[in-house]
Amino acid sequence: MIRQRIGTTAATIVFILGFIGVGHMLATDPGRLFRQLLFIGIFGLIFYVIYRVFMAPKISAEDMRYRKTAQASKKRMRRPGANPKVKPSATTKKKAKPGSNVTRLSKRPVRSTHRSDAPHLTVIEGKKGKKKKKANM
């Protein structure tokens, strides 16, 4: 906790001295201050362009692979005929038939027994017939 206070105090002192220095340079030699700011801006722009040219293609290639995988996953998980972005509103709910006594709460969606995508799992046969040895006390 003391180290955190020392770091915060040191950062505050550095910022205050920096503002004093910039203010003094602005009052005494504003042309030099603007030249320094211009050079800082030019070097920052050069580093930004170098970063974008050399580093951005690697990052965007990884991002494109992630997006493609996520899109394929969403496509696989989507149910046929259902739009996940559109939620049913209160006005579009289906009304029950007059002759049916089934309430809306008791209705469940019907699931088919046939799955189109079987899970890729295997059963590992173990020692099911043998009993475990118990510790004798």
Image (spheres, rainbow, N blue to C red):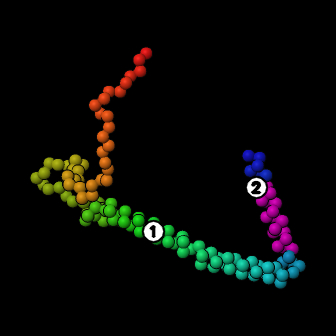
Q: Is residue 42 magenta?
A: no
Q: Which mark is residue 48?
A: none
Q: Looking at the image, which is closer to me, 111 or 132?
A: 132
Q: Position of residue 13 (x, y in %)?
A: 82, 60
Q: Secondary structure at mark 2?
A: helix
Q: Position of residue 65 (x, y in %)?
A: 45, 68
Q: Look at the image and tell me whether residue 104 can be seen.
A: no
Q: Which residues are magenta?
A: 8-24
Q: Looking at the image, which is closer to me, 4 or 125?
A: 125
Residue, disc 2: 8
Count the marks: 2
Task: Identify the image quadrant of residue 11.
Answer: bottom right
Spatial separation of the CA atoms under disc 1 and disc 2:
42 Å
Q: Is residue 21 magenta?
A: yes
Q: Main secondary structure of the magenta part?
A: helix
Where 58 falls versus 34 (above or below)?
A: above
Categorize mark 2 by other alpha carbons within 10 Å: few (<14), some (14-19), many (20+).
Answer: few
Residue, disc 1: 65
